[in-house]
Image: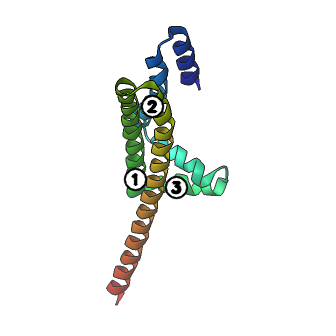
Amino acid sequence: MTFLVIGTAASLISGSVFFTLIKDSFLTASFGLICLGSLLVQRPLMFYINRQFVAGDDPERLEWWNGLWQYPHFRASQRLVTAVWGISYLVESLVRVGFAVLLPPAQVVAISPVMAFGVMIVLIAWTRRYMLAVRERRIREQQLSRANNSVMLL
C-alpha cells in the first residue's frame, strides 16, 4: 500500500505520464525481490503465504503444515515456488516498463492490469499443480518404500 501511495503521489507531483505507467512496476519488482531475498532466510516467503491458504488459523493444520518443513523435498519445493514467483514478478515488472517505453499510453493502461492479473492467475495455478505433483510423488515414494520393506520381510 505504501508503494501505491508513494507512486501515485509522485506521478501526480511529477506530472510524468511515463512514471504513472510504470509505478505499479515498483510494487511487483519489490515483491519479486522480497521473494528472492527470502530464499536467504530459514523459510522462504511463499512457505508462509501458502500456509495461510492451506491451514488458515486452524491450529492442527498449522502444526501439520509447519511439520512438513522437516522433509527435504518439501523444503526444496517451497524454495522453488518462491524463486519462480520472485523471478516471474521481476520479469513482469520489466515487461511493464518495456511496454511503457514502446507502446502508446492508452495501450499500456489497457494491457497492464490484464497482464498483472494474468501473471497472478498463472502463478497460482502453477503453484497448486506443482505442489499437488510433489505430494503425489511423495505418496508414490512412500508406497514403493512400504512395498520394498514388505518384500524384504519375506
- Asked if residue 55 lies left or right of residue 107, the reply is right
Residue 93, horizontal then vertical, whole percent: 40, 31
Q: Earlier in the sequence, mark 2 or mark 1?
A: 1
Q: Nearer the viewer, mark 2 or mark 1?
A: 2
Above or below 84: residue 61: below
Identify the residue under disc 3. Answer: 67
Secondary structure of residue under mark 1: helix
In the image, which disc is placed on residue 107?
2
In the image, which disc is placed on residue 32?
none
Residue 108, horizontal then vertical, whole percent: 45, 30
Query: Label 2 crowding class (10 Å Cα cut-off): few <14, some 14-19, many 20+?
Result: few
In the image, which disc is placed on residue 77?
1
- Asked if residue 69 lies left or right of residue 5, the reply is left
The reply to whether discs 1 and 3 touch (Cβ–Cβ < 8 Å) is no
Mark 3: amino acid? Gly
For the residues labelled 1 and 3, the Cα–Cα distance comes to 14 Å
Query: Label 1 crowding class (10 Å Cα cut-off): few <14, some 14-19, many 20+?
Result: some
Mark 2: amino acid? Gln
Query: Label 3 crowding class (10 Å Cα cut-off): few <14, some 14-19, many 20+?
Result: few
In this view, which residue lies farthest toward the right?
58
Q: Is residue 96 visible?
A: yes
Mark 1: amino acid? Ser
